[in-house]
């Protein structure tokens, strides 16, 4: 009996550490903690372009999630006017500051940003007629 309890205890221990590891790589949690001070998800903007229209820009600019995510990671690590997909935003808000995150965190948050693309919003800044592609994630 004692042994069984011990095994359950160990099981719980492993379980909870696995959950903690998953949480650490939850893109939306990383966003909430490190990006949401400046970026809202939906318009209106706070101090930076909102994520959903930004994700649309990325979907226009890049063919695959892999390319888009790579670019977002590079930009967040070291923002550069020349690399900005949204040059108007740089003019309007000023250049973003680099955000110090680990590579796995960057990958998770960049993937989350890419996935916020909402076909119902169209591909522009909110002027779409909801005629986006049926499956945005297939790109
Ligand atoms: C201190 C405010 C601030 C924080 C925090 C911040 N950003 Fe930004 N971000 C900006 C501003 C301002 C811009 C628009 C100007 C520019 O592109 O540099 C921007 C632009 C961007 C762009 C568009 C770049 C392009 O290609 O045009 C992406 C993507 C982005 N941010 C992602 C993130 C992510 C992901 C985080 C969190 C890890 C984050 N930002 C945190 C201020 C911020």
Image (tube, grey):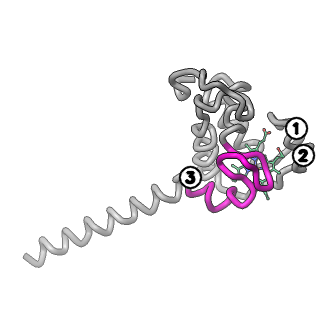
Badge 1 local density, few (<14 within 10 Å), some, or many (20+)?
A: few
Residue 108, which numbered label?
none
Query: Is residue 67 or residue 125 the one in the foreground?
Result: 125
- Residue for point 19% across, 74% down: 6
- Residue for point 71% across, 40% down: 72
Q: CA distance from mark 2 to mark 1?
A: 6 Å
Query: Looking at the image, is mark 3 or mark 1 nearer the viewer?
Result: 1
Badge 3 local density, few (<14 within 10 Å), some, or many (20+)?
A: some
| Residue at disc 2, CB closer than 8 Å to ligand 1 | yes
Q: Is residue 119 magenta?
A: no
Query: Is residue 75 or residue 89 the one in the foreground?
Result: 89
SS at circle 3: helix
Q: Earlier in the sequence, mark 3 or mark 2?
A: 3
Query: Is residue 28 or residue 73 the one in the foreground?
Result: 28
Q: Which residue is mark 3?
A: 28
Q: Position of residue 66 (x, y in %)?
A: 62, 31
Write down the region rendered in magenta: 29-51
Residue 88, which numbered label?
1
Q: Which residue is mark 2?
A: 92
């Amino acid at each position: 009996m004692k042994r069984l309890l011990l095994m359950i205890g160990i099981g719980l221990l492993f379980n909870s550490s696995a959950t903690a590891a998953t949480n650490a790589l939850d893109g939306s949690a990383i966003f909430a903690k490190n990006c949401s001070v400046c970026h809202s998800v939906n318009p209106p903007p706070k101090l930076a372009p909102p994520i959903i229209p930004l994700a649309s820009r990325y979907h226009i600019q890049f063919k695959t999630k892999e390319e888009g995510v790579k670019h977002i990671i590079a930009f967040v690590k070291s923002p550069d006017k020349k690399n900005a997909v949204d040059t108007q935003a740089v003019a309007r808000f000023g250049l973003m500051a680099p955000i110090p995150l680990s590579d796995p965190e960057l990958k998770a948050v960049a993937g989350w940003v890419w996935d916020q693309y909402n076909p119902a919003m169209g591909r522009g800044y909110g002027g779409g007629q909801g005629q986006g592609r049926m499956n945005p994630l297939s790109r």
